[in-house]
Image: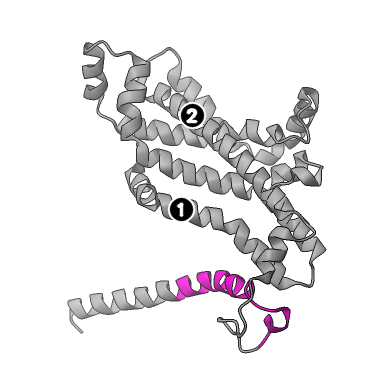
Amino acid sequence: MTKASRAILGKSILTIIMLSLSVITVMPFLWMLSTSFKLDADVFSFPIQWIPPKVTFQNYRDVWFGEIPFYHFYINSVKVTVISIAGVIATSLMAGYAFAKIQFDGKNVLFLFYLATLMFPDQTLLVPRFIFYKYLDIYNTHWALILPGMISAFGTFLMRQFFMTLPGELSESARIDGAGHFKIFFHIALPLVKPAIVSFLIFSFVWSWNDYENPLIFLSDTERFTIPLGLLTFQDENRTSYTLIMAASVCSLLPIFIIFLAGQKYFVRGIAMTGIKG
């Protein structure tokens, strides 16, 4: 067997393995989507009927307009996610720019301490945060989820890496023309790091939308629950109706798919440009 033939054979085997893994990964999502349109009697039919023999939209109607107000959970998640993302992107951009482009005493030491916070598991801070939120009287409010979500050491690190890739000549030229840091930040730096912003937005959206632990600890009223807790409540109330549970699960995943598809172009470019340069 020639070298070219071995290379083709190797690529073919790798393609088959990757394709098989992709199918295995996607199958549970396809089953969830298919089941959400089925009747209860067709859920466990064998062999699996990927296309339901009788397609019904009643499951989605029951999810949105049934006894449990699923749309309340949706509204709560949208509120928490949108405000948190707006805050975390603003703070990460400004902190990242400061660490990358502004010279001040102790910058490297401060950045090192800032990064060190990434090493602490979130679970170690749950009790102090619980006491602190009680003191601030924001326990069992959405602010207990929004405020900590507006600061991210990972986001600051990510943005700093992007700002460091920008040529220093750009800011030097702007300074010669009389521009200050705010003008350079808003008019020159921000438009050039758009892929980084979109990449971080997608990461932040997925984290905030799927966050289960913090709402479980800091929320007690059902009417304030976000999607993950709401989905659990919905599941407890409809244990035997897999079609309703799957319809609710599809509804909870839709915003993530939409956000990813809308920002896919910038997301791929942003990941490719990261480079993780020191």
Quarter of the rendering containing residue 3:
bottom left
User: What residue does disc 1 label?
Assistant: 260
Q: Is residue 252 magenta?
A: no
Magenta residues: mostly which secondary structure? helix
Give the secondary structure at mark 2. helix
Q: Please name the residue shown 76% across and 38% down the image.
A: 218
| Residue 220 in the image: above or below residue 113 | below
* Colour logic: one colour
Mark 1, other Cα within 10 Å: few <14 / some 14–19 / many ≥20: some
Give how far across and how far down residue 45 sits, in percent: 67, 86
**From which residue to which does the magenta span run?**
20-45
| First along the sequence among labels 1 and 2 | 2
How far apart are the two marked residues, 1 and 2, measured between alpha carbons?
20 Å
Give how far across and how far down residue 114 sits, in percent: 53, 27
Mark 2, other Cα within 10 Å: few <14 / some 14–19 / many ≥20: some
User: What residue does disc 2 label?
Assistant: 90
The quadrant in which the C terminus is found is top left
Give how far across and how far down residue 240 sits, in percent: 79, 72
**Is residue 278 visible to us here?**
no
Residue kind at label 2, given as amino acid type: Ala
Q: Are marks 1 and 2 in contact (CB under 8 Å)?
A: no
